[in-house]
Image (tube, rainbow, N blue to C red):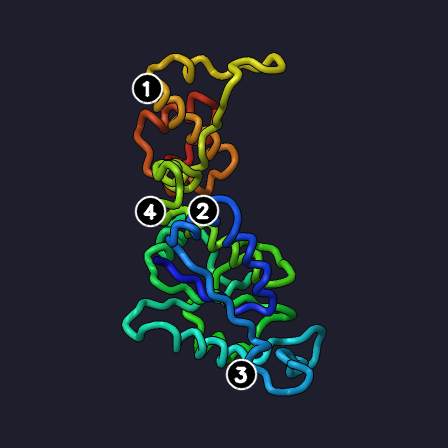
């Protein structure tokens, strides 16, 4: 079972990922667990202070070292010393969260997710105790809780038994380095728009080829940076050129 240990000032937010949808069902099956620690439980003044003004001046506040360290020590004391543990700080300054990274994280036994607030956390805590900083995008939100839940959702989907059909995860966008193909369901015609005939043909080889080509086309037009990293056959490169899409591999 994969265990998430979350350090957060707002642990109640994590009921959303624990109780709902795919992640909720996986939690009920015992595939993963979420343990939250609030740094306010490790402060000793009457004001429950977890943050202070930054050295050097400037706006905002910074989360203090000691409450975070004591929260992490509490977590580590609950984990067997032989278990694999990775400490992650959700930060806009971190490495991008990719599907490859998600697959890597799904192999760990224990993931500690530090959710910052305010202007961030004392850099000394990051230097001494954080294994990796991860970003969910080039934007800023009010705290690390939503990014942490996004990471958790992405990782839980890859746990065996989390999805009704495990092949669903293998066919998601980015699983093979490209964006996913378009999908359709019944009825076959609605508002004058028809489902592509090949998908109704029953010809599985033709359907597989169509889906592959749609992935190529969609990735080339929307995320050419991704396609540049995909190993394409000459036939696929030629098809992209015929479609008027950039032949990235031979530029």
Judged by depth in the image, the label closer to the viewer, 1 or 4, is 4
- Residues at marks 1 and 4, CA–CA distance in whole angstroms: 26 Å
In the rendered view, would you say 136 is above or below 186? Answer: below
Q: CA distance from mark 3 to mark 2?
A: 36 Å
Q: Which residue is mark 2?
A: 25
Q: Residue at x 51, y 14 (%)?
A: 188
Residue 101 appears in which quarter of the rendering? bottom left
Which quadrant holds the N terminus? bottom left
The residue that appears at 48% across and 74% down in the rendered structure is 126
Q: Identify the residue position indicated by label 4 in the image.
A: 160
Is disc 2 placed on a helix, strand or loop?
helix
Label located before the other in sequence (1 or 4): 4
CA distance separating discs 1 and 2: 32 Å
Label 4: how many Cα within 10 Å (few below 14, some 14–19, many 20+): few
Q: Report crowding for label 1: few under 14, some 14 to 19, many 20 or more residues within 10 A (C-alpha).
A: few
Q: How many marks?
A: 4
Q: Which residue is mark 1?
A: 204
Q: Earlier in the sequence, mark 3 or mark 2?
A: 2
| x, y percent for residue 87 | 42, 68
Mark toward the start of the polypeptide (3 vs 1) = 3
Tell me which numbered mark, 1 or 2, is placed earlier along the sequence: 2
Question: For the view shown, which residue lies furthest in the bottom direction?
Answer: 45
Q: Secondary structure at mark 3?
A: helix
Q: Nearer the viewer, residue 47 or 203?
A: 47
Residue 4 as seen in the image, left or right of residue 232 = right
Q: Are marks 3 and 1 in contact (CB under 8 Å)?
A: no
Label ID, residue 66: 3
Q: Which label number is shown at residue 177? A: none
């Amino acid at each position: 079972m994969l265990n998430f240990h979350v350090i957060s000032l707002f642990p109640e937010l994590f009921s959303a990922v624990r109780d709902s949808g795919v992640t909720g069902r996986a939690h009920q099956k015992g595939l993963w667990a979420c343990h939250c620690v609030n740094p306010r439980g490790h402060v000793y003044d009457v004001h429950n202070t977890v943050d202070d003004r930054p050295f050097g001046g400037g706006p905002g506040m910074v989360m203090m070292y000691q409450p975070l360290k004591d929260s992490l020590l509490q977590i580590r004391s609950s984990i067997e010393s032989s278990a694999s543990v990775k400490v992650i700080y959700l930060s806009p300054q971190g490495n991008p969260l990719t599907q490859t990274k998600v697959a890597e994280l799904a192999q760990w036994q224990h993931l500690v997710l530090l959710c910052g607030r305010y202007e961030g956390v004392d850099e000394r805590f990051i230097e001494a105790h954080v294994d990796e900083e991860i970003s969910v995008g080039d934007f800023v939100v009010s705290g690390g809780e939503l990014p942490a839940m996004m990471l958790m959702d992405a990782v839980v989907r890859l746990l065996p038994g989390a999805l009704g059909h495990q092949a669903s995860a293998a066919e998601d966008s980015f699983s093979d380095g490209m964006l996913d193909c378009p999908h359709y369901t019944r009825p076959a015609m609605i508002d004058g728009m028809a489902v592509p005939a090949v998908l109704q043909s029953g010809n599985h080889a033709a359907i597989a080829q169509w889906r592959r080509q749609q992935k190529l086309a969609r990735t080339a037009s929307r995320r050419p940076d991704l396609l540049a990293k995909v190993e394409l056959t000459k036939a696929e490169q030629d098809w992209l050129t015929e479609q008027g899409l950039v032949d990235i591999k031979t530029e």
